Amino acid sequence: MSSGDTPNTPGDGRTIVGSAFGSDDGSADPALRALLEAKSASARDLLGSARLLVAVIAVADEIDQESGADKDSHMAVVSMVNAAGERGLLAFTGLDAMALWDPVARPVPVTGVAAAQAALDDGNTALVIDVCGPRKYVVAGEDLKKLADQ
């Protein structure tokens, strides 16, 4: 092995970047929830740096015909479509709100800015926060673009 070589280790020297929310226990920020519930104009400003949880679920790509079990699957973020055909990326203020929607969804902590950017990148027209409560809040249109640009 030459001096520039690294030993063959799991991951071949790659590392996973740690979460910016390392001590996060999944609880909602009470100040953020209060602003969202009041539909306060300052909610968007706080959303930029707030931690949101984006829902990720397993999606079956192929089912075994004999057993009915998943043969192949992938993880995907979740969007909802309203009656007008507009899509909104789901995000949650806390694990409690996510569990109201789907108790088996996996949370991915991101900033509000990152959630807005992901929504737009995936072709969504809205970011739907706490869709099942405690109080649904929707960021759409120019507000979504402004949030993504923070």
Image: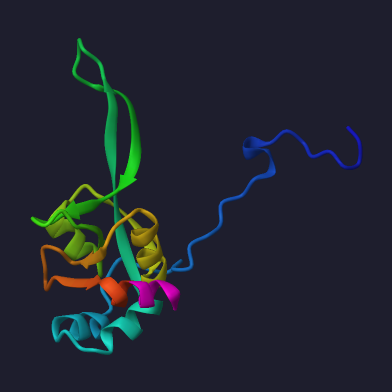
- In the picture, measured across the screen, residue 114 lies left or right of residue 63, that is right
11 inside magenta stretch: no
Main SS type for the magenta part? Answer: helix
Numbered range of the magenta stretch = 145-150
Report the quarter where the N terminus lies: top right
Q: Is residue 60 above or below residue 6?
A: above
Q: Is residue 39 left or right of residue 126?
A: left
In percent of width and height, residue 68 lies at 19, 18
| Residue ranking furthest to the top | 66
User: Residue 102: percent from the left, percent from the top?
Assistant: 16, 51
Q: Is residue 13 left or right of residue 44?
A: right
Q: Residue at x 18, y 64 (%)?
A: 96
Vertical side of 127 occupied by 101: above or below: above
Q: Nearer the viewer, residue 7 or 69?
A: 69
Left or right of residue 12: residue 70: left
Colour option used: rainbow
Check the image and report above or below for 2 versus 111.
Answer: above
Task: Using the image as rendered, state which of residue 95 and residue 71 is in the foreground.
Answer: 71
Quarter of the picture containing the C terminus is bottom left
Residue furthest toward the left?
Answer: 83
Pick whichever, 95 or 93, lies toward us. Answer: 93
User: Vertically, is 141 above or below 75?
Assistant: below
